[in-house]
């Protein structure tokens, strides 16, 4: 009997069994690692797609209410973005209506007029609820006034109905460093303002008559029409003053109701009498490498419109 030969055979079988068991465990580990990697990749791709607005928010039951958070100064570029998103909502039957949350200190008069008129027309096709959360000043109020009733947080700042054309003079600094302005122009009023001098009385009167006063009157007339009141009734509140929304003096003049956002949402749900999901329709900030984009913009003109506040 060869005891040594039997021992070697048994050792070989044990090693083969251990190797087979290890291979089985290794295969399972590899399979789970592969599954985890696939799930992680899918999650990343979904997150990126959502950040770029490629995927719609899932709503399990009921309708959607589109939420527009107008949280920037009023510029034509931002207004164009808002209109673009709201146009999509108008065509989408999944959305019952729009909740427009105003958080803007104002900006361009023309952009304010464009969005104000757009909202009035939009409201005829799909209901818009206007809520002033923190501030609706100047152009922000111009836009907010387009929708009635005008609902606000009690501490929101509203009003500032007026027009301003900012101007800074570096005349004294320029003299110290030896910088002079040397323009060529034709037409007496082609360049009524300059950084290198104060605005003269003649140019000041010209700008006020030709630009500021007409824009100011348009602002007053638009708000009066939006609020459904005579110009004379609104005039005491159009001197550029800012008000806290729950001030008794502006009740049913500049603001109709005081509420909080969660209560307003609950009111909308009750009115619609169905399960509702509130979906922010404005694009989120881009992620990753595409977020860090620097733009340089040069203009040969004075951008009066963007300067009016």
Image: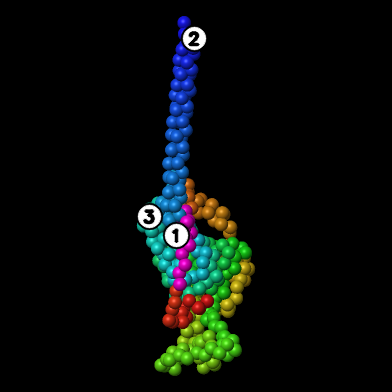
Q: Choose between 16 and 221: the one closer to the eye.
A: 16
Q: Give the residue drawn at x 54%, y 52%.
A: 266
Q: Which residues are magenta?
A: 279-296
Describe the element under mark 2 as helix, strand or loop. Answer: helix
User: Which class describes the residues within 10 Å of circle 1: few (<14), some (14-19), or many (20+)?
Assistant: few
Q: Give the residue drawn at x 47%, y 67%.
A: 294
Percent of width and height locating residue 111 = 45, 72
Disc on the earlier residue, 2 or 1: 2
Disc on the earlier residue, 2 or 3: 2
Q: Give the residue drawn at x 45%, y 15%.
A: 9
Q: Give the residue drawn at x 42%, y 52%.
A: 49
In this figure, which residue is indicated by the disc labeled 3? 92
In this figure, which residue is indicated by the disc labeled 2? 3
**Numbered disc in front, either 2 or 3:** 2
Give the distance between the C-alpha atoms of the residues marked 2 and 3, in whole angstroms. 84 Å
The label on residue 290 is: 1
Disc on the earlier residue, 1 or 3: 3
Q: Choose between 307 and 210: the one closer to the eye.
A: 307
């Amino acid at each position: 009997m060869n005891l040594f030969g039997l021992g070697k055979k048994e050792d070989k079988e044990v090693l083969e069994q251990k190797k087979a068991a290890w291979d089985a465990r290794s295969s399972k580990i590899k399979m789970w690692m592969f599954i985890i990697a696939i799930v992680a990749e899918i999650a990343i791709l979904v997150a990126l797609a959502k950040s770029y607005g490629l995927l719609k928010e899932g709503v399990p039951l009921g309708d959607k209410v589109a939420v527009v958070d107008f949280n920037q100064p009023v510029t034509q570029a931002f207004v164009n973005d808002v209109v673009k998103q709201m146009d999509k909502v108008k065509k989408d039957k999944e959305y019952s209506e729009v909740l427009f949350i105003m958080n803007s200190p104002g900006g361009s008069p023309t952009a304010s007029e464009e969005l104000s008129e757009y909202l009035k027309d939009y409201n005829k096709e799909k209901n818009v609820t206007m809520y002033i959360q923190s501030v609706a000043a100047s152009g922000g109020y111009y836009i907010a006034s387009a929708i009635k009733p005008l609902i606000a947080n009690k501490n929101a700042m509203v009003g500032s109905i007026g027009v301003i054309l900012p101007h800074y003079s570096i005349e004294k600094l320029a003299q110290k460093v030896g910088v002079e302005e040397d323009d060529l122009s034709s037409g007496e009023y082609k360049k009524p303002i300059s950084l290198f001098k104060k605005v003269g009385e003649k140019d000041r009167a010209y700008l006020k008559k030709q630009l500021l006063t007409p824009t100011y009157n348009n602002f007053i007339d638009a708000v009066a029409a939006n609020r459904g009141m005579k110009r004379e009734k609104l005039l005491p509140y159009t001197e550029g003053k800012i008000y806290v929304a729950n001030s008794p003096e502006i009740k049913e003049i500049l603001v109709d109701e005081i509420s909080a956002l969660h209560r307003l949402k609950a009111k909308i749900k009750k009115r619609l009498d169905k399960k509702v999901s509130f979906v922010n329709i404005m694009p989120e900030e881009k992620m990753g490498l595409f977020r860090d984009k620097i733009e340089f913009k040069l203009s040969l003109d004075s951008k009066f419109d963007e300067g009016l506040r």
